[in-house]
Image: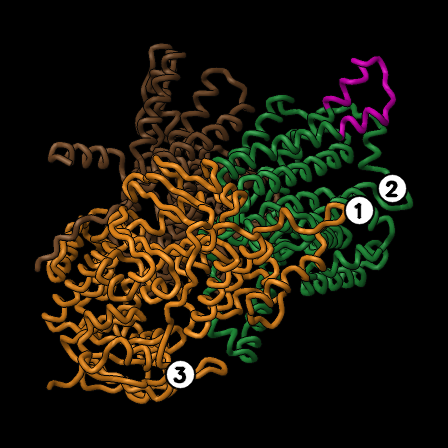
Amino acid sequence: MTLPGHLLARAVSAARGRTNEGLVAVTLVGLALAVGFVDRRFWSLATVFNVLHDSFEPLVFSLGFLVVLLTGGIDVSFDAVGIFAGYTVARLAVASPWLAHNVPVAFLLATLIGVGLGGVNAVAIGALHLPVLIVTLGTRGIFTGFLLSAIGSTYVSVLPGTLVDFPTRDLVRVHASGGQSVGLHVLVLPLAVLCVVLSLFLTRTVTGRGLYAMGGDLEAARRAGFPIRLIQGGVLCLAGALSGLAGMIHVALIGYANPFDLVGMELNVIAAVVLGGASIFGGRGSVLGTVLGVLLVSLINYSLILLGIPSAWQRVAVGVLLVLGILAQTVARRPRRRAPTPLQVSP
Amino acid sequence: MIRLVQLLRGERVPWYLLGTTVAVFAVFAVASPGTFPSIANLQSMGFQFPETGLLGLGVMLSMVTGGIDLSLVGIANLAGLVATEFLVAAPRLVGHAAPPALVVLGVLLALAVGVGCGAINGILIGVLRFPPILATLASLQFFGGLAIAWTGGHAVLGLPSAFTDIGNASPWGIPVPVFIFAGSALGVGLLLNWRKLGVLMTLVGANPVAARFSGIRVARVLLGAYVASGALASLAGVIIVARTASAAPDYGQSYILLSIVIAILAGVDPNGGFGTVTGIVLATVCLTLIRTGFDSLGFSQFAYQMAQGAIVIAVLALSAAHRTLLLALRRRLSARAVLHRPDLRSVGRGEG
Amino acid sequence: MSSPLLRLRGIAKRFGGVQALDRVDFAVDAGVVQCVVGENGSGKSTLIKIATGALPPDEGAIEIAGRSYSTLTPRLAIRHGIEAIYQDLALFPNLTVAENIALARYLGEETPFFRAGEARAIARRAMDYVGVRLDPDAFVDDLSMADKQITAICRALARDARVIFMDEPTAALTWREVESLFRVIRHLTARGVAVVFVSHKLDEVLAIGDRVTVLRNGLVVADGPRGTFDRRTLVHAMTGRAVLDQRQTRPVSPHAPVLLAVQRLTLAGVFEDISFRVRQGEILGFAGLLGSGAVDVLETLFGVRRADAGEVIIGGERRTIRDPSEAVARGIGYVPGDRLAQGLFLRHSVTLNIIASTLDAAPTRWGCLRWGAVGTLVGRVLAELRVAAPSPAVPVAYLSGGNQQRVVLARWIMRAPRILLLNGPTVGVDVGSKEEIHQLLRELSEKGIAMLIASDDIPELVALCHRILVMRRGRVSDELVGAEITEDALTHALQA
């Protein structure tokens, strides 16, 4: 190939991203254009803010799912962990006014609860040598059952203290001409920081690269000297922390705590992560891709509502989207013919 | 009778599961002697477990081929819904028709839906080579969404009693669903052990590359497996709808994972290759026993969920320990086996 | 002469009832290519594992840098600069070359942070040491086998390896790539690194080795400078027998019908313009390694891959084969190169493995398989091929390599193919079984089955084939017929 050809190929490859994030970004933009074309109301700040708002909770869940998926495991207990943490903190806040007035502490507590539950997962998997999917199927039932029987099954219909104000804590508020106003929720800041930190962890630390290594070839990772058990345990605790955080976000944003919530929506998270370019077999994926995938799913759901399509079709839409997304990925990832590259061996 | 014995002989009976089931029964029978072992209780269980058992059979079939089918609940709901809409609308269309024929038609319609949905899965997975977990995730959304969109989210009522008898009658004291489940279980057992398609399914699950290199038409086998799963799911859908006398478009969300739990408890190797129908039956019965046992003892259904999770882990740990014990024993007894034993760790990476 | 970098003294290891290594003494000097030769089951892999700390020995000591250990751990071995590169390479396909090379080093140094630029620098340094240039940002998944191996070697060097064990490194390399690898090895030894080249390929051992150690049944039966060995003495030491395969072929009548004719078969980038004919009862050999396209031709004929151009004429009729099931329907069978991954259903019984290709024609009653009748049929084939198994219900994983290969053959015999394609028919098979399988193949050809054998085992091709096509870089470069076929002639043709 000629030099300009080489450079072009390099540029295209960089734009595409390691896991085809570019593809997702293009899809996102394309979808936005299409919807905006159909309904001009789409082009407003409200859209941006609302889609972001709807993405907070699934994003954090997705990030938790992603880190475990990178190592080759599928953790299906995340929604159970989430609601466990969120509901427990809500109940504790009802009982303790101090907690109810200390929102950051509430979030921290939820995260810690998540770490604890993630730790249970870690212990179970470490002891049983079984695939993550199967063990978390079991722990999921245990978490839900424990939550509902030991902690309570009653609705907390109004959050106490300053928690109740949380949904309206906006970073920026814009007043539109029609007298309405939309706000960009303050959560966008800490979550942005979370994404950056996580991304740095995955790309700039040895342990982070180790996650990818484990997903690529577990045995090779073991032989290379990665402390597999430790990393697996750590990543499950991290996923637990993120799930706990996400659960708290759910409860705080929605304004009430229903212990029956959340369980059953794991499919949306998996779809978002996969659409974002992560491989279901492990070893591939990125924070950026996951963010884009979550935004894509949120955008679709939002658009369907905007266009007046009954919410029932949302599920169908997500299903079709997933199929198209996988098709696109398989096509994009066609293995290139492996011709031996000429070795330049100095004599 | 002889056939039955031979059929059972062809299966590996999971002894640990049988033991657990018996133990569970004994425990609850002792704990609440008045209510638990009563005929009424057993009968009521007999109305509940077949639908989950059928779903478990369906999941087992997909796992035997090395995949997983998450869409079965969606198929069940859709199939039940189609049958219901037909049975509710038909009398108006035809004037009035003889119920038995209509009921049969309704069931056949449901089966057709199950086969059709299963075929969609089979094409996605067999022909288009989608990873099964993702394909069935997507199709679950699709089928479920269709059902919800059709009914607008509410349940459909008005089923003729001839149909609801399927879910509520018990000739000779045995609930009709039990007959359906037993027949299906026998059918699946027959398929896996004695029919060519079933044997091919176990081969494809064990080593898809070797299956292809043996001249096996892998795509066709996978299509057959998922169609069969879909058919089983549609039967479950018929039972659900008949039993509850209504078609709720998103019934049984908890069944999705429950059916996988059953398949795993039954000892289906999620990496494909082995499956045992008796295991599915036992696992279904065992979990139902626990549930009704908890009910009769006044435990909340939440405690049951906990117990379900704990049982899965406990049984898996037991069987894993059992396997390593056996391996260690074999190693000691046979040197040749060790020297020539290749690394049997799963090659496939997908977690089901 | 300075003291050896690594020395094993009196090493013994037992697995169950088998003595894998028996009082083995082994030493590796700096800057030397030490070859370890032996058949499968001779103890080669156990030796590597013990020397690199992956397995503890039952008895004996390991001496490195003046210290004596009764057992090593992988970390300790790595710290002393002892590394192994196994056949599976243990690379991360989803990471780049630079990451693969550098991560190992990062782990050793216990720094938490990973910088892509630094990783690239480490990789470049290692590659310069080896004398090779690869794209550090390429994904290992996209590399050729040879480049992957270079990456693995660089990874070992990035950790300042002093002794590198290579386990069957040339198994998946083309001839040119083997030459390149040898250049790399000599480069390394010139810098004082010791390379232990573990292989069963005698030609390569004789080409690259400085010293040779021969293992048989866990014992060191010969050990000395390469000059003291030649092919015959090596074979004798390895197998305990004087003479191996001799060329035995019954001539094929020129009037025998042509069963398969291939014209200008082409698969872009892999092979080009392949034309040949095979007659009934003829054994046609394809000499050349993976990159030459020999195996790919067989796979294309079997329908695993689809040709871009050319014609395949079976039994006089033009056919397009798009899938192995179509090939099988046309009377073609295929014994794949990797029987464990491609040929066998390890956890299933011998019976099921054998019947796998003939299920559609299996005896049934009322739609159900008659296992009894199947058992009889299978039993007949088992006896015919002299498969040694405790019972047909035993999982095929428990059989020896030779018997497993017989099971694969049995599967195709059941189908009575007209044409049998074989890829490396005796890879990983012990010597005794090897000869027996060759005899079986000869019997099959006498029954009229046409066979195409792709193999890198020169003596095997010489012993069996009526004709041999030599392939290089995707084209047929030479043809040897009848009396022209000798080991020297074939070796020469391959190296040309």
For this view, does B21 lie left or right of residue C339? right
Q: Nearer the viewer, residue A289 or C398?
A: C398
Residue type at mark 3? Lys
Image spot of residue C133 (x, y percent): 14, 53
Marks 3 and 2 sit apart, C-alpha to C-alpha, by 66 Å
Residue farthest to the left?
A347
Letter of the chain in green:
B
Instruction: Confirm whether the magenta stretch covers residue B43.
Output: no
Image spot of residue C83 (x, y percent): 25, 70
Magenta region: which residues?
A: B85-107
Work out whether disc 1 and disc 2 sit on a shared chain.
yes
Which residue position holds label 1?
B46
Residue type at mark 2? Ser
Residue A299 sits in which quadrant? top left
Q: Nearer the viewer, residue B91 or C224?
A: C224
Dot 2 falls on which chain?
Answer: B
Mark 1 surroundings: few (<14), some (14-19) or many (≥20) residues within 10 A: many
Marks 1 and 2 sit apart, C-alpha to C-alpha, by 9 Å
For this view, does C432 lie left or right of residue C243? right
Letter of the chain in brown:
A
